[in-house]
Amino acid sequence: MTDLPIAATPRPSTTVCVLREHDNAMEVLMVRRSPTARFMGGAWVFPGGVVDDADSSSRAAALVSGVGSTELGWVAAGLRELVEEVGVWITPEPFASRVPDGAGSVYAEAERRSVRFDGAAMVLFANWITPVKSPMRFDARFYAVSVPAGVEPEPDDDEIDGAGWSRPETVVERAGAGELLLPFPTRKSLELLAKFATPSDFFSHVRSLDEVPVVRPRLRIGEEGGLDIVVPGEPGFEDIDEVGGPDFETMRAAARVAEQSGRPIPELGG
């Protein structure tokens, strides 16, 4: 069994929690990745993806308002992915509409429609950085944005084969019952969202923070042989050697042990 080399710099990526108020409660938009997807197939996640070069271009800067050059790529990527995956446009008046087949990129469609994205509506609330020895590493910034009632997702039926609104606590409960698969950062974000009654309450909390939390989970082999993910503040976190932890093959074996025992396999994506 051979140790894998330390992974390269994590790939910048953006995750977007789309929130709305419905029946005096907060709901969050969840999407299901296609079972055939190479990464996290079948998992329920928030929309998002990797930051592309086009997201930091002058073209993107002209189409995304209310954001500085340092954050442009992250915000633009999230706005673009929302349209690509579920047809949700975050503009001064958010709406839902798929990009027609053959129309080109989201940015080209925005220019054709003469619309600009509202970058200021995207509120950064967390930054998750995948553990050093993960086979795929991401530097994922988590943003939240609120949309009015009536903005309904339209999945692309390719990368995303399902989408819908749900209360955060309901999603967590269903995952705990084994009804659906949630990546670890997704579940932790839902647990945070569940503490607030409305999107406004959540945004007030985020804006009261002195700084956006950066979460760097660490990995260990659990007492029953499964793979554990531990975040700062949890028991044993400081005892885990981030760089000298289990190699990838050992982690895969631990994940198989977890699967055979009926425990959910930890997923490290967004």
Image: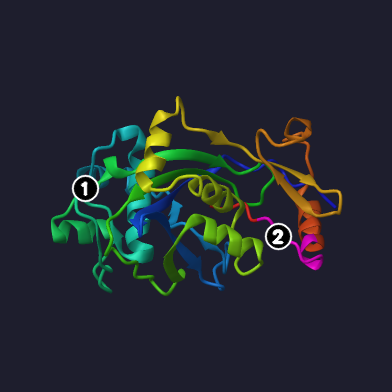
The boundaries of the magenta stretch are: 258-266
Q: Residue at x 27, y 53 (%)?
A: 90
Label 2 SS: loop
Q: Quadrant of residue 224?
A: bottom right
Q: Is residue 118 above or below residue 99?
A: above
* Residue under numbered circle 2: 265
Residue density around tag 2, few if under 14, some if 14–19, many if 20 or more, within 10 Å: many
Would you say residue 19 is visible in this rendering?
Answer: yes
Magenta portion: prevailing SS class: loop
Q: Nearer the viewer, residue 11 or 125?
A: 125
Q: Is residue 205 above or below residue 265?
A: above
Report x, y in % for residue 51.
42, 48
Q: Nearer the viewer, residue 244 or 14?
A: 14
Q: Residue furthest left?
A: 114
Q: Is residue 3 above or below residue 25?
A: above
Would you say residue 53 is visible in this rendering?
Answer: no
Q: Nearer the viewer, residue 201 or 218?
A: 201
What coloring was used for the rendering?
rainbow
Is residue 29 on the magenta stretch?
Answer: no
Q: Residue furthest front?
A: 24
Report x, y in % for residue 35.
56, 73
Comparing labels 1 and 2, the label whose residue is closer to the camera = 2
**Mark sitting on residue 63:** 1
Horizontally, residue 243 falls left or right of residue 158, namely: right
Asked if labels 2 and 1 touch by Cβ distance under 8 angstroms, the answer is no
Label 1 SS: helix
